Every structure is written in C-alpha cells, then in structure tokens.
Image: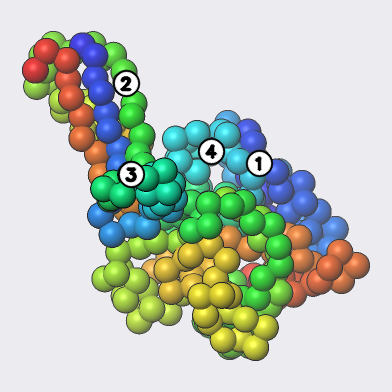
Amino acid sequence: MQVKVFVTPRKGILDPQGRTIESSLKSLGFANASNVKVGKYITLDIDAKSTVAARDEIKKMCEQLLANLVIEDYRFEVEGE
Amino acid sequence: MKWGVVRFPGSLDDSDALYAISEVMGEAATMLWHKDESLQGADCLFLPGGFSYGDYLRTGAIARFSPIMKSVIKFANDGGLVFGTCNGFQILCEAHLLPGALTRNKSLSFICERVNVRIENAHTRFTSAAKPGQVLRLPIKHGEGCYVAPEEELRQMEERGQVILRYVDADGRESDAANPNGSMRNIAGICNERFNVFGLMPHPEHAVEKMLGGDDARVFFQSIIESAR
C-alpha cells in the first residue's frame, strides 16, 4: 500500500518560510493569497494486512519520527481507502 | 571527573569541545562514537554542535535514534549531567530530555556572530560559578535556533527557573533587536526539570580562550567541575 504523509507547522507556530512566500506571492500581484504554510510531503510503501493495520503503523511512525508534535501536525492518506 | 564528547556523523564541534575540556580546562575527556552504547564511565556528557545526519527531516531527529542515545537517555534519567550545545541542544529536545523544539531562524538566514546572553539562573550545576544577571559574550552559528514551546509549558519553565540563558543587549536588557533568531521569550538556553540536562544554542567550546575572541564560557565548565567536587 502506498502512503502519503503531510506534515505541517502547528497553528500558532511561527512559519517564516510561509510568511516569506506569502509576501512574494503578493508582490507578484496575487493579492488574494493568504495563510501560506510550508510543510513536508512524505511518501512510503507499507506492507500491511489491512488498511486498519497500516493506519496504526503509520500513526506510530508519525508520532515517533516523521513529525515533532511540539511544532508540527500530521495527516496521512492510505492508497485505496 | 571524566567527560565524554559524543561524535555523531556530521558533528562539527566535537574536536573543539574535546580540546576545550581537556587542553584548556585540564579535565579528563574522551570521544564517544554514536554507534557505541558504552559511555566509558563518563560523569558528564557533552553533545556538540554540527549537522548530525545532514539535519535530514528535522535537526537532531535522526541522531536521537543513534545507538548511543539509549545510553544517554538512561544516563540522564538516572541524574547524570548532560550538556548540549547547538545541534546537541536540538538532539536533546528531539529526545524529549528537554522541553520544546528549535525551528528555522525567524530571518531564515544562517547566523554566525557573537551575541550577549544573560545568566537567568545561577543556582544550577552548569551555572553556579556565574553571577545572577551576568552578561556573557558568546558565539552562535546556526540556521535553526528559534526556540519554541507551548505557552503553558513556558510559564511553568519560568516558574521553576528552567530558563537559564536569555539573549540580551550589551547592557543586559532583553529586546527584539537583541534576539538573533526569534526565540520565544529570548530564550537561549534551558534546563530540564531535574536540572541535570542543559541545552543552549551558543557555543561554549568556542569561548574559552581570550586569544580566540573571549573566554566568557569558562564559567559553564568551571561550574560543572566545581559541582563534581
């Protein structure tokens, strides 16, 4: 099964990259762009008996390594769900 | 007292730290390889700066799972002294030995300069040789030194005296201008609740000799050495 993991800065955590990109978008004339956030997109394959089992494993991966919950939130999608 | 300096792949300041501890401070020190689990009888561990594992994923996130870190975590949980600078500080946060996290500098620039930091708590084994409120001039060199923690956690840390160092101006006053990286509450260094683990972004190992620009950081080493007597 293929998995897509999205890691994004937590609400309230300073995201200087997002802010810089937002001001660049505005200077290009995209005045309607706001709330730009920069995160990480991680893909991986997982060998699991069911999507339920896969989701359990991926949650552990996210909480132990892929995201730092002090500063980041995560969500993921499992192929075929 | 015996010191152990942990070398990770990508550590930069490991040799300078070993030099500062052994040659300048005259203490017994040994280098520890990240793949070993033995701490070789060290009484104080030094986690140096650098870019362990290329800073992949997040700074310190991969190093935190190096074989030696199991021993470091156990050593710290048993009350052993652990001193982490820059990348060492980031690793200690990722290993949950210290609260909070270090993120991209607010300016997005890598900063390499001397800054002023104020001793906020001189009643720890890392700072007892300093005077409360003393201002030290120390070098920093980092891209990810912006300290963040949840507001409630910060409030409790302040109450318990866990904020050890704050970025200030030359007169010892904190301001946004004196904050090089956007750290919350100008925080430059913290301790854990037990006060046996200390992490800071500045580099004490680069500030122990006048000839090399200043020796203000000797107070940290002196404090640790005196506390062991």
- Residue B155: % across, % down: 32, 76
- The lab-note entry on whether marks 1 and 4 share a chain reads yes
Chain of residue at mark 2? A
Height in image: B208 above or below B41? below
Q: Which residue is mark 4?
A: B55
Q: What residue is rendered at 30% in x and 64% in y? A: B150
Q: Which residue is mark 2?
A: A43
Image depth: mark 1 or mark 4 in front: 4
Question: Label 4 near label 1: C-beta < 8 Å?
Answer: no
- Cα separation, mark 2 vs mark 1, equals 28 Å
Residue ID at (43%, 74%)? B185
In the image, taking residue B105 as reference, residue B138 lies left or right, namely right
Which residue is tagged 3? Answer: A30
Question: Of callouts 2 and 3, which one flags the residue occurring earlier in the amino acid sequence?
Answer: 3
User: Callout 1: residue from which chain?
Assistant: B
Residue type at mark 4 is Asp
- Expressed as whole percent of the image width and height from the top left, the position of residue B215 reads 79, 72
Mark 3 surroundings: few (<14), some (14-19) or many (≥20) residues within 10 A: few
Q: Is residue B169 above or below residue A12?
A: below
